[in-house]
Amino acid sequence: MWKSVASNALTLLIVGIFLLGGLVLWGKDQYTGPGPLAEAICVRVQPGARMGSVTNDLEEKGAVTSASIMRIGADYSDKTDQLKAGSFLVQPGASMEEIVDVITRGGANSCGSQIIYRIGVTSAQAEVRDFDAASGRYVEKAEFDLSSDAPKPEDFTRLRNQSDTAYRVVVAEGVTSWQVVDALGRIDVMEGEIAGVPDEGSLAPDSYEVRLGDDRAALIDQMQAKQALILADAWANRVEDLPYDSPEEALIMASIIEKETGVASERRQVASVFVNRLNQGMRLQTDPTVIYGITKGEGVLGRGLRRSELDRETPYNTYVIPGLPPTPIANPGRASIEAAMDPEQTDFIFFVADGSGGHAFAETLAEHNANVAKWRQIEAERANQ
């Protein structure tokens, strides 16, 4: 009798072990195998969230077949306590294992909501965007001018109150330091005061990630440190025989190049014109320097230059003064700084707009006058349309 009982018990134990082993293998297959998600989704993990609530949310959204298996797998791999707050893109067919890796690895948000502050040459605006997981693109929800006193869009208020909203400040090439300081003062997700306007040209135009409550002065320091590195690197790699005695003079030239053309392929040609003029003792005769002498970089002139302004002697009127103006006239980007350090080898000493957004370059005054005549004709035709 006891032998029979022992035999049956052993049989049940063996069967139980096989069943348990099969269950473990099935669970592992469920955890590591392709998931049921048909379209990408954006998973938001709130600060302080626990793995249980996140897995339940994923199960409700149809991203995983079993919240329990996902929790067990995360616990087995020692990732339960490594959950990171943020917004993370989960791709179609992602396994539970892959999702756990995404939400515990952390890093920058790969989806979610963004508020981007764009500081441009003519305006400063805020752009509110939501990520559309299905298309893999950010969709603009609202836009408003930072200088406007009108109520902020509802989408801005909504995203402003979300803990996982990402913020970014984008500074365009050619903005002045005053414009940057003025715009930063209007960005209400940042705090602190900026003690004065930084030196013109000392801020690096770029895209900067910021967080709620970040210090404005600290961001200015970051921009200055980056520009200093860019300038030092470009100066160290400059070509020979340039008409600049210091990196600071090269930065002045770079700012003029930045304001004279928005066409990337022209920068080194424009640089060659001004370098040739300096080498030949010719005045630079460039409108943007005259404009800066009038506005001091505080906003946009908004009209054409008057003859009296072109004739008046000021430190920035390069139609009157020889050489470079005393300071940069804007914050140039890396490409313009590099163009100033490595201009194209040409004999050009003139250029004028060609009607396409670019410029026509010339080696002689006769060629230049012909190009000017063509441009005047284009202006007249446009005025009559």
Image (cartoon, rainbow, N blue to C red):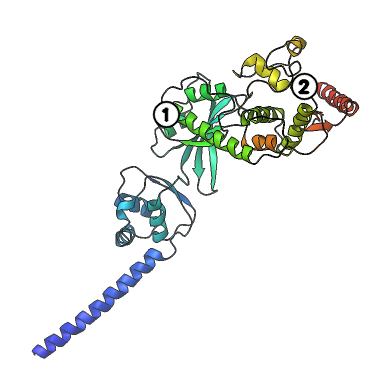
Direction left: furthest residue: 1
Q: Residue 283 bears which disc, if any?
A: 2
What residue sits 52% from the left and 31% below the top? Answer: 224
Q: Residue 21 bears which disc, if any?
A: none
Residue identifier under label 1: 215
Q: Closer to the N terminus: mark 2 or mark 1?
A: 1
Label 2 Cα crowd, 10 Å radius (few <14 / some 14-19 / many 20+): some
Image coordinates for residue 322, horizontal then vertical, percent: 74, 19
- Badge nearest the viewer, 2 or 1: 2
Q: 100 or 210, which lies in front?
A: 210
Q: Quadrant of residue 334?
A: top right
Element type at mark 1: loop
Image coordinates for residue 273, horizontal then vertical, percent: 78, 31
Q: Amino acid at mark 1?
A: Asp
Viewport quadrant of the N terminus = bottom left
Q: Is residue 264 left or right of residue 135?
A: right
Q: CA distance from mark 2 to mark 1?
A: 42 Å
